[in-house]
Image (tube, rainbow, N blue to C red):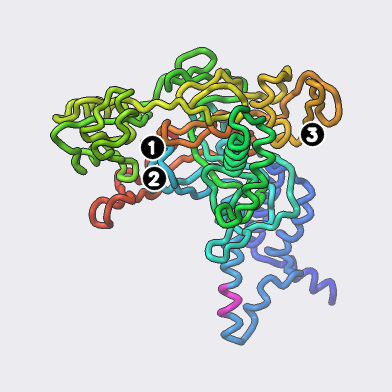
């Protein structure tokens, strides 16, 4: 009797055996790709689902209760969909929406993208127990969409090609590990530094505060301002906000910015056609109309018109007359040339910045947004000679991204309690910048992007909505459908 029962379990049509073989092969190939071979213990489960049925996978289909059939039918479909979406979202593709103008005009606010995780190689998730399609917080419920434990170490599977200079990249925000929920821009670390700096400079205007003191005091101030900053939360790497920028420097590069021009390894880089900067536009006898600005692809949110008489001294310093209308908005080189031909436009001046509130904050480098570096992008296996000039640049990498204890005692450096004069990097790093250069919070403000933060490459725009237009007045950008998002 037992023999007959066992024989009947294997007595399946050829079609069912083929299905079992195909799915078993897919499962084995997936495990080989991931490299987690202990998952092979699940192979008998796959075989059982198709052939032997020791586990009653479809017990509910034998029920005569219509309610059970209906409910379990939905449960079965939902569970299958969630599992499929989880694996697709984790290892193959992810949907992403462009929220800010930092990459305009390459990618526009309102673009919806397919992001290929297989391009650079998908990461094995740090937090495997998470709900698919939700980055870190359930909407409306306002609670975490992931379970913090277990957390797996960083591992990246083999991809199709390496990350190259000028690639557009989606990545987890590096300084998004600690977040003040009510105020996320600027990020937590910049807020702490600014709060501490302001407090210390107020207490002693004649002394430049030490960077460590700014952060130490600033953290206490941010924590105390509950209404303004809200709850302070920690997020693992794969649960940090997704950003999208262009990679302008890869591991091992020397990078410098001179008057907004990027140089890599001492070579001037060719600017992409859609690169744009902010300009002041002086007009006389006329105001710029919406039709013209729309033709120049200037978003309404980016337009600022200064009323006559505002900032007289500031505008005089750059050769503008504050008694006349002055506009401020970003333009590409082509749009700038076009605008110069418009009647009534008398002067166009690029915006400059002397502010030194850039990376590394408090590092004493006197760099600005428009004139930055030179700075070296760390490469895995390369050794850095530690000194007090480069410590502010690479300190976060050593302490936070690569999980070391770093101390400076008597002018000497100790890593993990061992005296050393050098440090060898464990990962590759990248330098990311927006194409909308003056409206982009990028590596110039928060530093390097570690390789374990790389999510993937945008490959396709599948939907694009213009927030400045009505539904029947050009809101849907049909010309961007299925646009290659890699350029």
In the structure shown, which secondary structural element does the residue marked by tag 2 occupy? Answer: loop
- 421 sits to left or right of 68: right
Q: Are marks 2 and 3 in contact (CB under 8 Å)?
A: no
Can you say whether 323 is above or below 455 in the image?
above
Mark 2 or mark 1, earlier in chain: 1
Q: What residue sits 46% from the left and 18% below the top?
A: 258
Give the camera-side residue of 340 and 130: 340
As drawn, is 321 to the left or to the right of 392? left
Measure the alpha-carbon separation of dots 2 and 3: 41 Å
Highlighted magenta segment, given as a residue range: 70-74
Q: Nearer the viewer, mark 1 or mark 3?
A: 3
Magenta span: helix, strand or loop, mainly?
helix
Residue beneath disc 3? 405
Q: Which quarter of the rendering shows the C terminus?
A: top left
Residue where numbered disc 2 is placed: 109
Q: Residues within 10 Å of mark 2 (few under 14, many from 20)?
A: some
Magenta region includes residue 168: no
- Label 1 Cα crowd, 10 Å radius (few <14 / some 14-19 / many 20+): many
Q: Is residue 26 visible?
A: no
Residues at marks 2 and 1, CA–CA distance in whole angstroms: 8 Å
Q: Residue at x 64, y 61 (%)?
A: 14
Q: Quadrant of residue 317?
A: top left
Viewport quadrant of the N terminus:
bottom right
Horizontal and vertical percent for residue 197?
60, 36
The answer to whether residue 126 is seen in the rendering is yes
Q: In what element is the residue under mark 1? A: loop
Asked whether the residues under the numbered discs 2 and 1 touch, taking CB atoms below 8 Å apart as contact, a structural biologist would say: yes
Q: Which mark is residue 325?
A: none
Q: CA distance from mark 1 to mark 3?
A: 40 Å
Q: Secondary structure at mark 3?
A: loop
Q: Which residue is mark 1?
A: 104
């Amino acid at each position: 009797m037992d023999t007959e029962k066992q024989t009947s379990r294997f007595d399946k049509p050829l079609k069912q055996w083929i299905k079992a073989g195909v799915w078993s092969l897919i499962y084995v190939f997936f495990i080989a790709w991931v490299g987690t071979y202990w998952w092979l213990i699940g192979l008998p489960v796959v075989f059982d689902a198709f052939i032997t049925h020791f586990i009653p996978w479809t017990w509910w289909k034998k029920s005569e209760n219509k309610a059970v059939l209906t409910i379990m039918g939905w449960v079965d479909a939902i569970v299958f969909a969630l599992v499929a979406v989880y694996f697709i979202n984790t290892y193959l593709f992810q949907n992403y929406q462009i929220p800010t103008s930092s990459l305009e005009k390459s990618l526009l606010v309102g673009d919806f993208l397919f992001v290929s995780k297989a391009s650079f190689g998908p990461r094995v998730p740090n937090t495997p127990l998470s709900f698919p399609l939700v980055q870190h917080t359930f909407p409306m419920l306002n609670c975490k969409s992931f379970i913090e434990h277990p957390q797996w170490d960083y591992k990246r599977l083999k991809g199709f090609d390496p990350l190259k200079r000028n690639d557009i990249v989606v990545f987890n925000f590096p300084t998004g590990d600690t977040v003040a929920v009510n105020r996320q821009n600027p990020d937590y670390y910049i807020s702490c530094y600014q709060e501490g700096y302001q407090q210390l400079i107020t207490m002693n205007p004649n002394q430049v505060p030490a960077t460590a003191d700014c952060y130490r005091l600033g953290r206490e101030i941010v924590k105390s301002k509950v209404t303004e900053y809200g709850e302070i939360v920690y997020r693992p790497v794969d649960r940090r906000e997704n950003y999208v920028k262009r990679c302008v420097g890869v591991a091992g590069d020397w990078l410098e910015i001179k008057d907004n021009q990027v140089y890599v390894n001492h070579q001037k880089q060719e600017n992409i056609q859609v690169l744009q900067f902010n300009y002041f536009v002086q007009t006389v006898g006329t105001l710029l109309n919406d039709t013209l600005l729309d033709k120049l692809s200037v978003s309404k949110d980016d337009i600022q018109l200064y009323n006559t008489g505002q900032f007289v001294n500031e505008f005089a310093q750059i050769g503008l007359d504050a008694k006349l209308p002055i506009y401020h908005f970003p333009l590409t080189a082509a749009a700038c040339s076009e605008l110069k031909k418009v009647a009534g436009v008398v002067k166009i001046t690029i915006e400059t910045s002397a502010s030194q509130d850039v990376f590394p904050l408090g590092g004493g480098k006197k760099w600005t947004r428009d004139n930055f570096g030179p700075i070296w992008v760390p490469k895995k296996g390369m050794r850095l000679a530690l000194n007090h000039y480069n410590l502010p640049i690479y300190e976060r990498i050593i302490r936070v991204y690569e999980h070391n204890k770093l101390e400076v005692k008597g002018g000497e450096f100790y890593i993990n309690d061992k005296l050393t004069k050098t440090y060898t990097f464990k990962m590759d790093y990248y330098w990311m910048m927006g194409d909308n250069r003056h409206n982009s919070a990028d590596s110039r403000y928060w530093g390097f992007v570690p390789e374990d933060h790389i999510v993937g490459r945008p490959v396709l725009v599948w939907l694009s909505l213009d927030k400045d237009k009505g539904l029947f007045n050009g809101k849907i950008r049909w010309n961007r459908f299925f646009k290659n998002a890699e350029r």
